[in-house]
Image (spheres, helix red, strand yellow):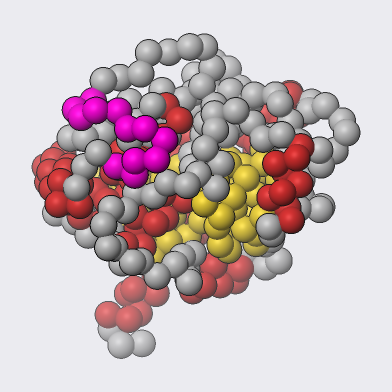
Amino acid sequence: MGSGKAIPGHLSHATPVRLSRGIPGPLQSVPSYAGPMVDSVAPSDMSPSETTAAAASAAAELARRTGRDAHDVAVVLGSGWRPAADVLCGADGTGEAASGMTEFPMSELPGFLPPTAEGHGGTVRSLEISGLRVLVLLGRTHSYEGHPVWRTAHAVRTAAAAGVRQLVLTNAAGGLADGMRVGEPVLISDHLNMTGRTPLVGADFVNLVDAYSPNLRLLVQELRPGMREAVYAMMPGPQYETPAEIRMLRALGAGLVGMSTVYETIAARAEGVEVLGLSLVTNLAAGITGEALNHEEVLAAGAASATEVGSLLRTLLEKLGDTDRRAEVGQ
């Protein structure tokens, strides 16, 4: 993270899995999209009715491609999280395979673009876990890639249009708090939007008091007692933070820093979707330690932790499915 060293992602089976904070590697062309680029202050180039229509169109195509009229829960997996996705979906061969999984490129849905940041796979998976219809989005679009803000929230709005009422957002982040370690999963308790931008347009006064669901965080704490919680600060990127910026963020109460998640959370809460945020610490931010990052150790810790987090997410979804079934029978 703010160490000044990039941690690029790579999803090839022939190389180690790399977790990064979504920073592009070699210079790549940015895919074109309908509509003009926006400047640094314009929140969106689409009206609320247009973003709603775009999400509805993508949700309709999602239903056609998956054969599922609706989904219950969505999981957005950030940089380098394919091992977590495979464990979550039972595709790693170590656990029970999920029921009826369908997989296809994210870019085949209307309004979606192939992610240009390394480590973001751009894949959609639809499956069933404990009776829940689960939508897994492996990859995300970042505003620093040159896209308008509405595109960063399009996946979340599509999930909401598809019936999703609970959303799990993951990311790779830099750790700011004392005692944090590389490879540690941390629950997001709140956020700081340091970008000066939002996916909302107009008089849409969304209440963010409980942006990150206390109920879902409590459920995770029951599954993994003592799991740390922290405030996540979103910076615009793509550059890493300076030591001075890290000192500022710590003074403001942040314990994590990254370049994603916040726009998605705001859009989800605007749609009435319950949000759980989960960061995986991939490095300690600039100025936290005087030592240079050991790149190989970071990669190894990140890959191992992604698998562990995938198992946690699978257990969480099974718990949510059991809870829903008990509620249906009045238990």
Q: Is residue 132 above or below residue 306?
A: below
Residue 234 can be seen, yes or no? yes
Q: Looking at the picture, how far across and down is residue 173, in whole percent?
A: 62, 42
The residue lying furthest to the right in this view is 290
Q: Quadrant of residue 40?
A: top left
Q: Quadrant of the N terminus?
A: top right
Q: Is residue 309 above or below residue 300?
A: below
Side of 255 relative to 188 (left or right): right
Residue 122 can be seen, yes or no? no
Whether the magenta-drawn stretch holds residue 281 is answered as no
In percent of the image, x 51 and y 56: which residue is there?
A: 277
Side of 102 relative to 326 (left or right): left
Question: Is the stretch drawn in magenta largely helix, strand or loop?
Answer: loop
In percent of the image, x 60 and y 71: which residue is there?
A: 222
Q: Looking at the picture, how far across and down is residue 323, in whole percent?
A: 39, 74
Q: Quadrant of residue 235?
A: top right
Closest to the observer, 37 or 269: 37
Q: Quadrant of residue 104?
A: top left
Q: Quadrant of the C terminus?
A: bottom left
Q: Is residue 140 above or below residue 250?
A: above
In percent of the image, x 64 and y 31: which residue is there?
A: 240
Whether the magenta-drawn stretch holds residue 35 is answered as yes
Side of 325 relative to 172 (left or right): left
Q: Looking at the picture, how far across and down is residue 187, in whole percent?
A: 59, 58
Q: Where are the magenta residues, as a range? A: 33-44
The tally of labels here is: 0
